[in-house]
Amino acid sequence: MITGTAGQQVKKVRLVPTFSSRDTLMAAQAPQWFYAMRHAAAQRYNQLGLPTSRHEDWRFTNIASIRETAFELPTSVDSGLVAAKQVESVGILGLDGPRLVFVNGRFDSNLSSLGTMPKGVEVLSLAQAFTSRQALLEKHLGTLAGVQDQAFTALNTALADDGVVVFVSKGCSAVQPIYILNITVADKPLMTNSRNLIVVEANAAATVIEDYASPREDVYLTNAVTEVVVGDNADVTHYLIERESHKAFNVSSLYVRQGRDSRFTSHSILFGGAIVRNNIYPVLDGQGCDSLLNGLYVIGGDQIADSHMRVEHTKPHCDSRQFYKGIMTDRASGVFRGRIVVRQDAQKTDAKQSNENLLLSDDASANTDPQLEIYADDVKCTHGATIGQIDEDQVFFLRSRGIPKQTAQALIVYAFASESLERMEVEPVRGFLRSQLLDRLPAGAVLKRLL
Amino acid sequence: MLEIKNLHARVEGNEILKGVDLTINAGEIHSIMGPNGSGKSTLAQVLAGHEAFEVTEGSITYNGKDLLDMAPDERAAEGVFLAFQYPVEIPGVSNTQFLHAAVNAQRKYRGQDDIDAIEFLKLTKETRNLVKIDEKLLSRSVNEGFSGGEKKRHEVYQMAVLEPKLAILDETDSGLDIDALRVVAQGVNSLRSPERAFLIITHYQRLLEYVVPDFVHVLYRGRIVKSGDKQLALQLEDKGYQWIEEEARAATV
């Protein structure tokens, strides 16, 4: 069990049955309220334990391999771990905004370039924020990401020691996307717990890109939590790009609260990882909100990608859209679980949810579970899910025009996925993902040349 | 150019073609007519290489090669083109993107370099004007949201860009208004050349007023039972297929 408060040094953490707390980088700066929060989270985690497939929310995703791995926590900043050259080759290029690079969950200022921020925009690491932005953290940190039911969120809260804090003041705009590149290199299994907080005040705007990549095929667990506070009439776009090692595990949870007339967009692209669980929990908590959750998972081998959503409408006249697409090959397993909750006050809700899956092999699988939970009586909610294979008539049509079979199939798969990419507005990201997508398709290289 | 001998083909266990013989030379236009279910579309699909149709007997020789031995994409690159009766929609791929890919795939098969981007633009622009197809339509996904007439004109557009040696039109004229029909006919006539042959499958003789065939064949119950010239088409228009059926029945008794 977790017995002590921060202060004890424990290097090895086995997630089950228990773990102990330890010193963190921030120990020196972190205030008492934060210790209290972590302590409560640690206790809650010890009560919850890691979920098993007996948990309704984890029915299709077996995380035994996470449970059975002994993860270490990063001990100190090792700035020589990743070279600047590697960052250039791993990262998405062509983004003009601030770039924050995290190596093994820790902010690396040498690899990062913050540049000059527009007026009213602050971007800093969580560790820095504890010195300069304590009041902001105390006001928001942990307010959206509850630890009551979510073991991984509890674990993150108990152990998080770095991450990004974005603060955009009333009426200001971050203009350029804020790019967070998370790189992990682990000789031994490692667990990182990034904690991000994005606060965008009324009439303000920001785009944040969370990118998870591995330069090597290492075993590790990324357990990230991001909280997003969207002010009245504000505009926030969040990208999650998962392209980690096929031996890596990733649990990412995005908690969002939207103010009146605000717009929130989430793009989730899951390409990498052995087991990936992507939780998105927006609460449309003011009238006239607009929420778009756009997702694409493209997996092969023995990968598991699990997209879990809970969209909660609490106020009238809000629109939410969930568009998720999955492409599975080999023995990969795609899971989609989307729930729309419409509270009694949320009249005139317009909620739509769709999940389409393409299976490219006999052993690939898709589990889709759209759910509606409605307490209001004047709402429009639709949901739908499909699981299919490549349409042979489409393949024949393309072949009859001279396009070879494999290329034709790749083109159809590419077309299926490209709808998700087309929704993205940041061109360097869209172009990068398009290229990554083609790299993952059989005959993608030929297709790249043809397109 | 094309020699079909004793062709038998079946789909899902049902034999549809029961011994088709047909020879087409370069420069000729052949028309195949016949009542519903006679096997017209099956013949077109077999020529293009649809895998759902199984050839159980007979042969097809195309320019000295065994056509049945070639994959659909190889046939296309060798110059066989099928204008589909029901063109499929492919959301997410733009018409232009698709056609560019098709042109380059065929060029690659023939050992040619990729088409120059400017050359491709020029080619498509000329063809666009020929078949009166809207540029905006071409920037959309393949056939997505197209009207029936637009889909058919789009098939003729692809044909004109790909410049096949043997073009098979499977009921391209069905469901077209007179203006669209003229556009389709104009597309075919403009491609007419001593090196190129056409096989026009049609249900009506209307198209044949604009595209005059050298030969008209009647396909009935999986066999070509009668061949003639343009006059045969007019006769069929006039008298229907009843007399063909009677003749065929008499022949088998």
Image (cartoon, coloured by chain):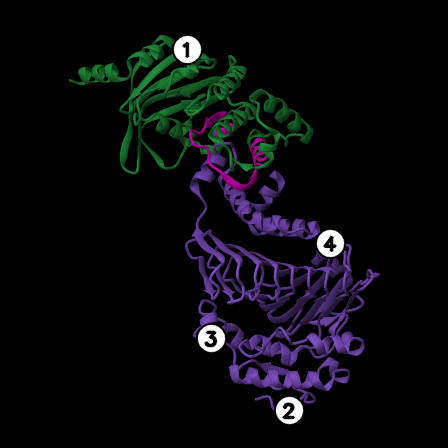
Residue drawn 73% across and 70% down?
A: A165
Query: Which residue extends farthest right?
Result: A116
Q: Which residue is disc 3 drawn over?
A: A52
Image x and y of residue B92, in percent: 55, 43
Q: As shown in the figure, which amino acid type bears the numbered disc 2? A: Gly
Question: In front here: A199 or B242?
Answer: A199
Q: As shown in the figure, which amino acid type bears the numbered disc 1? A: Asp
Question: In front here: A171 or B73?
Answer: A171
Q: As shown in the figure, which amino acid type bears the numbered disc 4? A: Leu
Kindly check if marks 3 and 1 are in contact, taking CB atoms under 8 A apart as contact.
no
Mark toward the start of the polypeptide (3 vs 2): 2
Q: Is A355 part of what is drawn in magenta?
A: no
Residue A4 disc label: 2
Distance from label 3 to label 1 (Cα)? 74 Å
The answer to whether residue A215 is seen in the rendering is no
Mark toward the start of the polypeptide (3 vs 4): 3
Discs 3, 1: same chain: no
Residue A93 disc label: 4
Chain B is shown in which shade?
A: green
Question: In front here: A380 or A166?
Answer: A380
Q: Chain of mark 2?
A: A
Q: Considering the image in quadrants, where does the N terminus of chain B appear?
A: top left
Magenta part of the chain: B76-104
Chain A is shown in which shade?
A: purple
Image x and y of residue A203, in percent: 73, 60
Which SS class for mark 2? Answer: loop
Discs 2, 1: same chain: no
Q: Is residue B181 above or below residue A401?
A: above
Is residue A153 left or right of B212 when viewed as pictured?
right
